Image: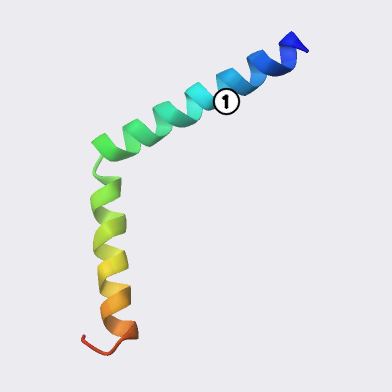
């Protein structure tokens, strides 16, 4: 049971680290820009 908990904890830490690296790399800004562009096209503003 402890092995399973340790695995989940390691995966959580790894996932959190990758999210932080993505934010620092500018990935969040790219996703936001694409989302704004897509929404603008869908409702006919673009």
Q: How is the image coloured?
A: rainbow
Q: Is residue 38 above or below residue 22?
A: below
Q: Quadrant of residue 31?
A: bottom left
Quarter of the rendering occupied by the N terminus: top right
12 sits to left or right of 39: right
Quarter of the rendering occupied by the C terminus: bottom left
Which residue lies at the image location 58% right of the left edge and 19% below the top edge? 9
Sort mark 1 into few (<14), some (14-19) or many (20+) by Cα contacts within 10 Å: few
**Extreme right residue here?**
1
Q: Position of residue 39 (x, y in %)?
A: 31, 76
Q: Is residue 44 above or below residue 38?
A: below
Which residue lies at the image location 30% right of the left edge and 86% below the top edge? 43
42 sits to left or right of 1: left
Q: Position of residue 40 (x, y in %)?
A: 26, 79
Which residue lies at the image location 68% right of the left edge and 16% below the top edge? 5
Which residue lies at the image location 26% right of the left edge and 73% below the top edge? 37
Reading the image, the residue beneath label 1 is: 11
**Extreme top residue here?**
2
Q: Position of residue 20 (x, y in %)?
A: 33, 32
Q: Quadrant of residue 22?
A: top left
Q: Secondary structure at mark 1?
A: helix
Q: Position of residue 16 (x, y in %)?
A: 43, 29
Q: Is residue 36 above or below residue 26?
A: below
Residue nearest the viewer, comparing 4 with 33? 4
Q: Is residue 3 above or below residue 23?
A: above
């Amino acid at each position: 049971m402890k092995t399973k908990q340790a695995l989940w904890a390691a995966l959580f830490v790894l996932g959190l680290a990758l999210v932080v690296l993505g934010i620092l790399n500018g990935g969040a800004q790219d996703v936001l820009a694409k989302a704004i562009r897509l929404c603008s096209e869908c409702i006919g503003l673009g």
